[in-house]
Image: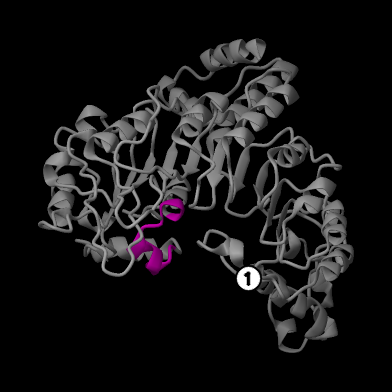
Amino acid sequence: ERLVASCGRKAAASTSTAAPADAERLVASCGRAALEQLVLSSLRAGAPISLKQLEGSARPPPARAAVRVGTAVAQFEDAGPFSLLPVDLLVKVLENCYLPVKLTFAIEVCKGLRPLRFVADLWSVVRTSLQDAQRLGHHYETVDWITSRNLVRFAQWLPDADKVTELSLLISKGFAPDDVSATLALFPGVERLSLTGQGMNKKILTLMAKVQRPALRILDLDWGQVGAATVLAVLKTAPSLESLASHKLSGDILEGLAKLLREARQGGTPLLTRLRQTGRYAENVTPFAGVAAGALFPELQEFTISFALRGPSPPLPTAPLQGANLRRLHIYDMIYGFTASDASPHLSDASLACFIKTFVSGCPRLESLCLSHGRKYLSRGETLPRLPRLGKSFQATPLPRTLVMLELKEIVVAPSDFAGCELPALALVRLKHCKDEHGPDLQKDTIEELCMACPKLEPSGCVADEHRFEPKHSSKLQQARVCNYPAEHIGGLSLEGVLDALERGYTLY
């Protein structure tokens, strides 16, 4: 690891000297894994790393990469009106359809369309779910259009299933563990794997732990009420893991995963860049475990987590989260809302300021920040306890100048709370339920103050309680539509979607 690090410094120094600022920016935007690959290729070839190579490594991956898994089809014959359509056009339409629709066209519509089975792009991504995987509650979906036995038959039906790189299976209750294991065995080259659903159990995980997956980079895994040892046995089979998402994370899982990844790299730094908790009820993850994640995974670029704090002054870490490479920090709940009627789980103003200092002060490269406090679930006749005020939290803990997107939820704001903040890159702001229930609503005034202070922020890029401010120029909204960004997400400013669009170079604002 020391050799790679020293070579990386030498290679960066030998990069085109015509644009050192560009080289520094590109190196900063490259992940650890990409830099290591560049340095190793440079050593093998005996040539310095070029600026063009850095640009290629810094460029974000496409949303969906086509993988050749069969024989190309030039034209459909005896397919009725479909014979008149270009193959690429029909395949492009079917690519965006759910899996049962693709199978219907490839098997049942007519014999002339059966060559669809051999069209590579159509089967490069296999998903059994009929819902958006990012939707809250996706974990509780039931897949009833296919049985576990037919999953095996489908995998056997594909001409080159071993070359499929993305597989997403939603395991419903009643799926046979042996069938799930047999299906996974037919997709050995998967780089991106999602196994979620209420049917995930210990037997499935035990069978998974018997098969090594060196190609696996991205894993979304549910495990229900299973011990950490069983989960870690599965994670051990993926020594090159770069992204982990799960409905239930815990401190034991994070520590065990970091140890496994270090051992797989002979003591080197784990290359995990994305850690995401997909459920909001996070009783097993404490702020102490959240802070420790920064030290366990130094290359972390995206961290999505929730907590279950109770009371106005819960214990918080004194050391900050060390996120030198962190670009996205999304905390979707700080508190546990289910408490007794005579108790308030809401944080005090001082505790909120301490929480922000703990999780923001050590992240100098943040581009997207979401801080959601959460609120108490009320029974009949109860009134909502006072929400914490932002106050001078951002004066005590300045926001990084790299910030592009900011979302605050259930934290009372006022225009003076952002006084002195220097945010030259800020372009998107969302305030949700950030008003005082017993006082004036200052969300709009706060947004106006931010728009005057931030050169890139306009009212069209701001949302307050789901109300999107009218853009000054209609062409900007038209540009967003051209970029295929759904109108309902523009209204709600989905952090994931907008930032993905920004990273791909689209002009939204």
404 vs 167: above or below = above
Instruction: Say which residue appears at 21% left-offset and 41% top-offset.
Output: 390
- Place of residue 494 in the rendered image (x, y in percent of width and height, measured from the top left): 41, 57
Q: Is residue 138 visible?
A: yes
Q: Is residue 473 left or right of residue 128?
A: left
Q: Is residue 400 visible?
A: no
Q: Is residue 376 left or right of residue 82?
A: left
Instruction: Say which residue appears at 86% left-offset and 61% top-offset.
Output: 179
Residue 490 falls within the magenta-colored stretch: yes
Quarter of the view holding residue 348 = top left
Secondary structure beneath disc 1? loop
Identify which residue, 221 or 399, lies in the foreground.
Answer: 221
Most frequent secondary structure within the magenta stretch: helix
408 vs 293: above or below = below
| Residues shaded magenta | 485-497
Name the residue beneath numbered marker 1.
130
Residue 181 falls within the magenta-colored stretch: no
- Place of residue 448 in the rendered image (x, y in percent of width and height, measured from the top left): 14, 51
